Image (cartoon, rainbow, N blue to C red):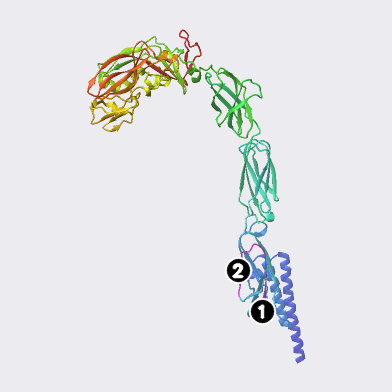
């Protein structure tokens, strides 16, 4: 019976093993037919296919282990499961940190403690009795290897997975241009463009586009360089970036290409009004459709030969029109003028030349100064002047322009011509007492200004002692007592004396007026505590021995006594005499108008007008020879 029982037991065990093998074969067969894990679906239908395959193998191992138990073999635990979580780019490359989870799997019949073993790359082995999760941030390839161990020390098959992390954006590419450069950043030829990857270690492709004059649709070029050409004039803007193997893109780079291979389309020049004596005004026009006008180069020539033009000036202007004045030209000369229009790329187009002749110039101040005494055809604008009694010390007097006067050259310098009337004018101009002395200089100058000026280029004034002193050789300091200081007991004085440089009132010298200067009317007289001053009166006869030449004697002499717009003081032992200079028959003398003992005098003399002409505004001597019958002409510029 014992043997039979054993035989029956063996028979029973054999039957059980046969059934289990048949079940295993049926599961494998169904799995191969339907591509599905029947056992796995029963426990977890959401596990992916790869994981299910591993579970199937593990479960088969469990079955095998169970068989081992039955037959006396040791059991094996199931392999762990490794899952990854993160953001994927191209080519299954992660572009973020990766969360790794390793899970322990137990079979349906598995009991006891299961220990987890795992390694990261070739690092140290780590263990855990629970599922583990950790984050991987290191870029590059990471390998995870994991297995389990049961209480008997049996090991599962290894579970392995590898993944790649690439979080770093690729470097920005560079753009290089190749062509013939003009000016202001413009190219004057076709432009070759090369886009290069900044870091060639992980470059999948270059993506670029061109907008503007030479459009190119967005293009992706595999590799580390891309090449193309800009062939259309105008402004084109290139945009490019790099794409790496993970699909990450670099920062964009842009490059503007300005291209202009065509010279300006037009260039013209035209005269603007009449030519002047030393200047010619012009208006220039230019156009450029691509880069636009940058400047106008103004040139001139006296021969009109193509290679004989000289550049006078360059005017930077983006306008299609530009005005310019040629300066410092020679008078009475024909000039040929042209403009060269330059565009922003540096290309130029010249205009056809135009001609103009400058006007004949008048005589210079140097030429006029060498013609003292010559006649000039000057005609003042008629005017009038009222000498009011409160200023001249007498009653009101009215004067008008004397017509028919002839004018002669007295001198010329600093672009100013000075003329003197050939005879006296306006006889009976009265100055009396202290107010006559106070205002003689200003009255005479204002009267001549009112009656003998002409517009804004000729100003009239009275002849004064300074004019004569300029041309005399006589030494006034040799005159008896001239320049000496005196203090008379009589102390009355016209009020303007307190402002004269040579007069001292109560110990204070004046600081405002010389003998021929006065800016405003002054009235009245005063008695000083102390009156002191320098002797400024003198007299002499004009002749070739006392003047630079007989010409000046002739210019200043006249049989009619006339005033000079200059004051002087004659100091005597008991008084001072306040005088106004005059000339009679070549004799320079002075008339007494007021004394420091309160005595006044009066008299009426003629006027000798002088005119100062601004040579920058008129031409002298375009016609005439300077004689009395053919005076030099005056032509307003």
Q: Nearer the viewer, residue 285 or 163?
A: 285
Q: Which residue is mark 2?
A: 134
Question: On the rendered image, what quadrant is the N terminus found in?
Answer: bottom right
Q: Earlier in the sequence, mark 1 or mark 2?
A: 2
Number of numbered discs overlaid on the protein picture: 2
**Coordinates of residue 390 in the picture (x, y in percent):** 25, 20
Q: Is residue 119 above or below residue 442?
A: below
Q: Is residue 489 above or below residue 64?
A: above
- Residue 37 visible in the picture: no
* Residue that extends furthest to the top in the rendered view of this protein: 629
Q: Nearer the viewer, residue 291 or 242?
A: 291
Instruction: Residue at 66%, 59% (x, y): give it.
Output: 93
Residue 287 position by quadrant:
top right
Residue 317 position by quadrant:
top right
Please tell me how crowded label 1 is: few (under 14), some (14-19), or many (20+) other residues with Cα within 10 Å.
some
Image disc number at residue 465: none
In the rendered structure, which segment of residues is drawn in magenta? 130-153
Is label 1 in contact with label 2 (beta carbons under 8 Å)?
A: no
**Coordinates of residue 348 in the picture (x, y in percent):** 63, 30
**Coordinates of residue 461 in the picture (x, y in percent):** 37, 19
Q: Which residue is mark 1?
A: 150
**Marks 1, 2: nearer the viewer:** 2
Side (left or right) of 233 relative to 368: right
Q: Is residue 505 magenta?
A: no
Please tell me how crowded label 2 is: few (under 14), some (14-19), or many (20+) other residues with Cα within 10 Å.
few
Label 1 sits on a secondary structure element that is: loop
Q: Is residue 135 magenta?
A: yes
């Amino acid at each position: 019976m014992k043997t039979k029982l054993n035989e029956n037991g063996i028979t029973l065990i054999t039957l059980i093993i046969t059934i289990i093998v048949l079940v295993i074969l049926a599961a494998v067969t169904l799995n191969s037919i339907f591509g599905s894990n029947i056992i796995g679906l029963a426990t977890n239908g959401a596990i992916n296919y790869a994981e299910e395959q591993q579970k199937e193998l593990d479960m088969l191992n469990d079955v095998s282990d169970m068989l081992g138990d039955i037959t006396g073999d040791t059991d094996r635990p199931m392999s762990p499961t490794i899952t990854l979580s993160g953001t994927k780019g191209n080519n299954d490359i992660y572009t973020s940190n990766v969360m790794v989870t390793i899970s322990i799997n137990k079979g349906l019949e598995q009991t006891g403690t299961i220990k987890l073993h795992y390694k990261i790359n070739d690092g140290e082995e780590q263990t855990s009795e629970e599922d583990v999760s950790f984050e991987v941030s290191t870029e590059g390839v990471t390998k995870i290897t994991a297995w389990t161990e049961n209480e008997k020390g049996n090991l599962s098959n290894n579970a392995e997975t590898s993944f790649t992390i690439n979080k770093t954006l690729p470097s920005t590419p560079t753009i290089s241009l190749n062509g013939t450069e003009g000016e202001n950043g413009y190219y004057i030829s076709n432009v070759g463009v090369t886009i290069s990857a900044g870091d060639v270690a992980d470059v999948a492709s270059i993506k670029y586009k061109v907008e503007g004059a030479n459009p190119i649709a967005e293009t992706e070029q595999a590799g580390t360089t891309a090449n193309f050409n800009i062939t259309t004039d105008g402004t084109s803007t290139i945009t490019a970036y790099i794409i790496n193997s993970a699909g990450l893109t670099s920062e964009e780079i842009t490059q503007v290409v300005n291209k202009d291979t065509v010279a300006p389309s037009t260039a013209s020049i035209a005269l603007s009004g009449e030519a002047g004596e030393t200047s010619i005004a012009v208006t220039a026009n230019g156009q450029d459709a691509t880069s636009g006008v940058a400047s106008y180069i103004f040139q001139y020539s006296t021969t009109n030969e193509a290679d004989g033009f000289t550049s006078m000036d360059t005017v930077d202007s983006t306008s299609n029109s530009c005005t310019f004045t040629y300066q410092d030209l020679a008078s009475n000369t024909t000039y040929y003028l042209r403009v060269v229009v330059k565009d922003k790329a540096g290309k130029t187009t010249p205009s056809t030349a135009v001609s103009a002749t400058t006007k004949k110039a008048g005589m210079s101040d140097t030429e006029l100064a060498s013609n003292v005494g010559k006649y000039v055809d000057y005609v003042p604008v008629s005017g009038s002047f009222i000498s009011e009694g409160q200023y001249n010390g007498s009653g009101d007097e009215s004067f008008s322009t004397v017509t028919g006067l002839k004018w002669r050259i007295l001198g010329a310098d600093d672009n100013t011509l000075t003329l003197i009337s050939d005879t006296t004018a306006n006889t009976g101009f009265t100055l009396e007492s202290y107010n006559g002395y106070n205002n003689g200089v200003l009255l005479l100058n204002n009267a001549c200004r009112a009656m003998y000026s002409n517009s804004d280029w000729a100003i009239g004034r009275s002849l004064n002692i300074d004019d004569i002193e300029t041309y005399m050789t006589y030494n006034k300091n040799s005159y008896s007592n001239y320049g000496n200081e005196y203090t008379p007991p009589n102390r009355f004085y016209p009020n303007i004396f307190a402002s004269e440089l040579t007069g001292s009132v109560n110990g204070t010298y004046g600081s405002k007026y010389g003998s021929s200067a006065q800016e405003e009317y002054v009235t009245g007289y005063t008695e000083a505590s102390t009156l002191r001053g320098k002797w400024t009166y003198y007299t002499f006869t004009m002749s070739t021995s006392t003047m630079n030449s007989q010409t000046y004697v002739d210019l200043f002499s006249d049989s009619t006594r006339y005033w000079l717009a200059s004051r002087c003081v004659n100091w005597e032992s008991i008084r001072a005499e306040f005088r106004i200079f005059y000339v009679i028959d070549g004799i320079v003398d002075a008339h007494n108008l007021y004394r420091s003992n309160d005595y006044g005098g009066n008299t009426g003399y003629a006027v000798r007008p002088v005119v100062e002409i601004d040579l920058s505004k008129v031409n002298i001597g375009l016609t005439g020879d300077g004689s009395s019958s053919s005076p030099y002409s005056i032509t307003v510029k």
